[in-house]
Image (cartoon, rainbow, N blue to C red):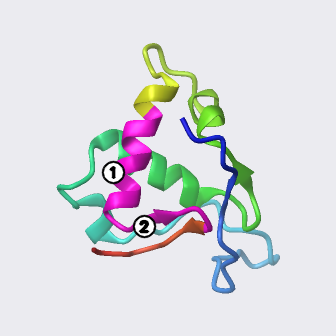
Amino acid sequence: MSDQIYRAEDDDQALVDADGRPAPMVVLPRTALRDNRLSLRARGILAMLVSLPPGSRWTLATLPGWVPTPGETTEDMQVAWDELVAAGYVTADGVVQGARA
C-alpha cells in the first residue's frame, strides 16, 4: 500500500452558489460513470475525490474511513485506486477529471 499523499487539483471553474460558496453538488463526466474499466467501488472513490475542496489531501489509508462501510478494507481501496490510475483518472498529483486512456 502506498503511503504517498494525494491532493485534489485546484479547479478555477468550481461551481459556486449566489453567495460565492461552493455549490452543494458535483458534476461528473458521464464517460467516467459509464467507463467499464472501473468497478463501482472505483467510480464511487472518483466521485468522492472530485467532491473534495481544492487543495484537499488524503492517503489511501484514509479512504476507508471517509464512509465506514462493513467489509471495506485498505486493500479494496488499493485495487480501486489502481483501476483509476490505469484508466487515467487519477495521478499522484491529483484527480484528472474526464480523462480517458
- Lower sequence index among marks 1 and 2: 2
Left/right placement of residue 34 relative to residue 94 reads left
In the picture shown, does residue 96 fall above or below 1? below
> What segment is highlighted magenta in the picture?
77-93
Q: In the rendering, at what x and y percent does residue 71 appear?
A: 43, 15
Are circles 1 and 2 on residues that touch, CB within 8 Å?
A: no
Left/right placement of residue 73 relative to residue 2 reads left
Residue 89 is covered by the magenta coloring: yes
Residue lying at 47% horizontally and 46% vertically, measured from the top left: 45
Q: Quadrant of residue 28?
A: bottom left
Quarter of the figure that contains the N terminus: top right
Q: Cα distance, mark 1 to mark 2?
A: 17 Å
Task: Look at label 2 and name its amino acid.
Answer: Leu
Secondary element under disc 1, as helix, strand or loop, is helix
Q: Nearer the viewer, residue 73 or 65?
A: 73
The residue where tag 1 is placed is 83
Residue lying at 39% horizontally and 75% vertically, measured from the top left: 98
Give me the disc on residue 28.
2
Residue lying furthest left in this view?
36
Q: In the rendering, at what x and y percent does residue 2 appear?
A: 58, 41
Task: Look at label 1 and name its amino acid.
Answer: Glu
Q: In the rendering, at what x and y percent does residue 43 appear?
A: 36, 50
Residue lying at 41% horizontally and 29% vertically, measured from the top left: 76
Residue lying at 70% horizontally and 51% vertically, measured from the top left: 5
Residue 68 is covered by the magenta coloring: no
In the picture shown, does residue 46 fall above or below 55? above
Q: Nearer the viewer, residue 6 or 97?
A: 6
Left/right placement of residue 58 relative to residue 51 reads right
In the picture shown, does residue 78 fall above or below 10? above
Q: Quadrant of residue 100?
A: bottom left
